[in-house]
């Protein structure tokens, strides 16, 4: 084989003509990329403008001015000052000389709130446990690379989708109807949503594993369950623990609001405070939830990093 | 069953348009050490996977004694896989499990569902596993994670796993392709001793001709899914080799270039 024979081949594989072919193709590719970029930007801006208009962002509303007259104003600049008003209403009166008494007045229902806070955390804990069990078991048949067949994959995926697409609050409404008011409905609601969310996250972890260990187990005469237990579970365990702790943090936030529809936890107090216009109660509740979430986030993050750290060292 | 031979009858496997294994007919008596050679994509791996039923044939049959392997299902199929152990180029161990548990995976075909899910093994099985590890000089590493071992050590763990299956046949898919010469020799010696002492049939895919010549009493060469040569090392002449590897244009085909063995190569030995 000589060099001449290679140069006459089409398309040319080397020499000046090969480079000019590259330059032509490169220019065409860049042009196509620029057009696509411009089109994408235009479509995005159009959709953004339409949704803003549909969402009343450009609405003009009548407001009362300080001198008593009425005038037309854009809704956003007109509404923002009212946010300040609302926050101001929720602020408690705290004086240095009578701080203890003022705080006691601000947190006047602390005994009830403390009990409900414990209930909130217990709902989150139980719901996370149920979600982990359900999500873990379903994540394997819901992974494209592990599902024993297409039907099982389809059914498991749809189940997880329904479980996580319906918000906790809606599940809570349904379960309050079934099991009456109380934390049981809350656990079921948050747990079911967590099953869907965790099942999805776990199955994505499963889809990234190395399949060779599973093949090794299969070649030794292992069943599908053996392949999952010995080949897949050891690989995904660190990620599963990490996602579980993250989900617990999210579930503490969810379970503090579902009480609004009667499913247990602190949420019911929000409703009471709002209907009785006890604005300072709202800020007290906010402080309680905020501190709880900060503490739990901090603790679980420490724990997660510790687990990840252990992983790296081992 | 004791002296059952493995028979492949016009075994074929097609992937879409490509025929990976094309009407392969072979008879391998119990206890033979057989090497399969051929260039990449010749169908060597597919052939081994067909025998172990990791993939199903498109046509043809596999028989072991009176058993029609191609018709096996469920439990019987898993027991066939146990009888016909397989080791892989990339070892296929579970990195995050310890060596002992990796070896015990070879016992899974015997375990019930609950015992296997709980990773619950009997003392006899653990004894068997540690003896297999000891045979390959790996007993001191039994409690270490498999992922922390070197490639050669991992392959020996994989052989121990295959041994505790108490198989009749040992399939090895490029077992030394990712190993350095020293470890490659240890692995090949282990396969040789298993063949000689336990009377297991060994069917090994190799990409180095000199290894095949050194260890295999019978060499099968494949090209484009077909068996092109079936005979002893002595019968494998340069002309046959050139035909198998399609090395047109290469003036000289030097086996030493692809070699992974330590000695046995005059070309590499200083004069």
Image (cartoon, coloured by chain):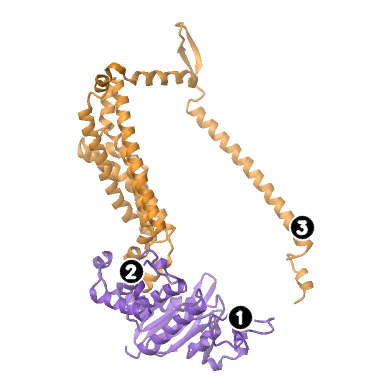
Chain colours: A orange, B purple
Whether tag 2 and tag 1 are in contact, CB under 8 A, the answer is no
User: In this view of the protein, which residue sits in the foreground, B162 or A228?
Assistant: B162
The residue at 75%/71% (across/down) is A6
| Quadrant of the snapshot with the C terminus of chain A | bottom left
Q: Secondary structure at mark 3?
A: helix
Check residue B143 in the rendering and tell me which mark sits there, or answer none. Answer: 2
Q: Nearer the viewer, mark 3 or mark 1?
A: 1
| Quadrant of the snapshot with the N terminus of chain A | bottom right
The residue at 62%/89% (across/down) is B238
- From the viewer's perspective, is residue A111 above or below residue B147? above
- From the viewer's perspective, is residue B43 above or below residue B27? above
For disc 1, the neighbor class at 10 Å (few under 14, some 14 to 19, many from 20) is few
On the image, numbered disc 3 is attached to which residue? A20
On the image, numbered disc 1 is attached to which residue? B257
User: In this view of the protein, which residue sits in the foreground, A68 or B100?
Assistant: B100
Q: Does residue A89 appear in this view? A: yes
Q: CA distance from mark 3 to mark 1?
A: 38 Å
Comes first in the chain, label 2 or label 1: 2
The residue at 62%/85% (across/down) is B242
Chain hosting mark 2: B
């Amino acid at each position: 084989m000589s060099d001449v024979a290679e140069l006459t081949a089409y398309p040319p594989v080397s020499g000046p003509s090969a480079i000019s072919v590259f330059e032509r193709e490169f220019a065409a590719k860049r042009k196509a990329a620029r057009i696509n970029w411009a089109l994408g930007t235009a479509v995005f801006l159009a959709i953004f403008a339409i949704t803003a208009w549909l969402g009343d962002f450009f609405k003009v509303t009548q407001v009362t001015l300080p001198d008593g007259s009425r005038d037309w104003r854009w809704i956003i600049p007109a509404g923002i000052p009212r946010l300040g008003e609302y926050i101001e209403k929720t602020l408690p009166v705290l004086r240095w000389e009578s701080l203890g008494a003022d705080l006691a007045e601000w947190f006047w229902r602390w005994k009830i709130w403390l009990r409900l806070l414990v209930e909130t955390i217990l709902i989150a804990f139980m719901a996370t446990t149920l979600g982990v069990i359900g999500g873990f078991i379903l994540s394997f048949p819901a992974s494209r690379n592990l599902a024993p067949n297409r039907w099982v994959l389809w059914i498991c995926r749809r189940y997880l989708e329904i479980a996580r697409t319906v918000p906790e609050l809606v599940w809570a409404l349904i379960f309050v109807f079934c099991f009456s008011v109380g934390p049981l409905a809350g656990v079921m609601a948050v747990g079911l949503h967590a099953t869907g969310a965790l099942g999805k996250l776990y199955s994505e972890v499963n889809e990234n594993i190395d399949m060779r260990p599973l093949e090794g187990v299969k070649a030794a005469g292992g069943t599908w369950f053996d392949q999952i237990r010995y080949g897949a579970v050891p690989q995904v365990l660190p990620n599963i623990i990490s996602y579980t702790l993250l989900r617990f943090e999210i579930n503490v936030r969810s379970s503090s609001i579902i009480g609004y529809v009667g499913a247990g936890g602190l949420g019911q107090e929000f409703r009471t405070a709002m209907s009785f216009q006890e604005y300072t109660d709202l800020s007290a509740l906010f402080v309680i939830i905020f501190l709880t979430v900060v503490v739990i986030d901090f603790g679980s993050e420490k724990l997660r990093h510790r687990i990840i750290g252990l992983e790296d060292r081992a | 069953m004791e002296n059952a031979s493995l028979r492949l009858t016009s075994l074929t496997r097609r992937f879409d348009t490509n025929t990976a294994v094309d009407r392969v007919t072979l008879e391998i008596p119990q206890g033979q050490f057989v090497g399969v050679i051929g260039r990449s994509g010749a169908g060597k791996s597919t052939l081994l996977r067909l025998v172990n039923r990791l993939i199903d044939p498109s046509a043809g049959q596999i028989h072991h004694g009176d058993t029609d392997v191609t018709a096996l299902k469920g439990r019987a199929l898993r027991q066939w896989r146990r009888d016909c152990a397989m080791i892989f180029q990339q070892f296929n161990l579970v990195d995050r499990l310890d060596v002992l548990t990796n070896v015990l995976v070879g016992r899974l075909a015997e375990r019930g569902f609950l015992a296997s899910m709980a990773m619950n093994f009997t003392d006899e099985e653990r004894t068997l596993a540690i003896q297999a590890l000891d045979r390959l000089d790996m007993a001191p590493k039994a409690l270490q994670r498999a992922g922390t071992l070197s490639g050669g050590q991992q392959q020996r763990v994989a052989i121990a796993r295959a041994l505790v299956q108490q198989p009749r046949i040992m399939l090895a898919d490029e077992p030394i392709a990712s190993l350095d010469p020293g470890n490659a020799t240890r692995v090949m010696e282990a396969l040789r001793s298993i063949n000689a002492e336990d009377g297991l049939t060994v069917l090994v895919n190799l990409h180095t001709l000199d290894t095949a010549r050194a260890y295999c009493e019978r060499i099968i060469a494949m090209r484009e899914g077909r068996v092109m040569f079936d005979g002893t090392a002595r019968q494998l002449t340069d002309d046959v080799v050139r035909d198998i590897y399609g090395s047109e244009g290469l003036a000289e085909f030097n086996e030493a270039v692809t070699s992974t063995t330590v000695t046995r190569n005059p070309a590499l030995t200083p004069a």
